[in-house]
Amino acid sequence: MEIGIVGLPNVGKSTLFNALTSGHAASSNYPFTTIEPNVGIVLVPDDRLARLTAIFAPKKTVPAAVRFVDIAGLVKGASSGEGLGNKFLSHIREVDAIMHQVRLFADPGEHREAVREGERQGPDRG
């Protein structure tokens, strides 16, 4: 099974990916740190597998695995080419399931952007 991790830019998709896969994908506090998808495979522990292998003695035992794909952040207008646009959408089409990562805390960047906008306007225009 292949699961794509999606969400807005900078919500922690790569951090979640690293936690699930013990990976080392780049994770920074700015949007679009991930451009190309990161891929990690996690074996699914199953105590029944050893017992079934002992009973049936197959030539080969293959444990179940989940393939996680850390996909670049989804931005408004992706379907019309914004952000990574159609490249993003093509990565989504390839997965079996989607894990949507959401931010459950306020974005401190919103406040910084308001301050920057005030600085651009200058003291006489605010």
Image (tube, rainbow, N blue to C red):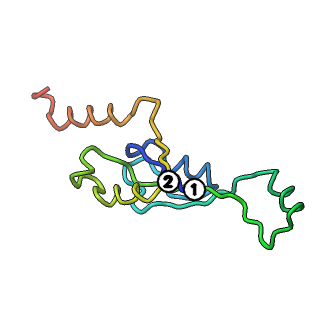
Please tell me which residue lies in front, 62 or 11. Answer: 62
Q: Residue furthest top?
A: 126
> Could you say whether the residue bearing mark 2 is in a helix, strand or loop?
loop
Residue 93, given in percent of the width and then of the height, sits at 39, 56
Q: Is residue 83 left or right of residue 42?
A: left
Q: In which quadrant will I find the C terminus? A: top left
Q: Is residue 113 left or right of residue 11?
A: left
Residue 56, given in percent of the width and then of the height, sits at 85, 64
Residue 112, given in percent of the width and then of the height, sits at 32, 35
**Which residue is the site of mark 2?**
96
Q: Residue furthest right?
A: 54
Indicate which disc, 1 or 2, sits on the residue closer to the N terminus.
1
Please tell me which residue lies in front, 96 or 15. Answer: 96
Q: CA distance from mark 1 to mark 2?
A: 6 Å
> Could you say whether the residue bearing mark 1 is in a helix, strand or loop?
loop
What residue appears at the point 72 percent right and 60 percent down from the top-left corner? Answer: 63
Q: How many marks?
A: 2
Amino acid carrying label 2: it is Asp
Amino acid carrying label 1: it is Met
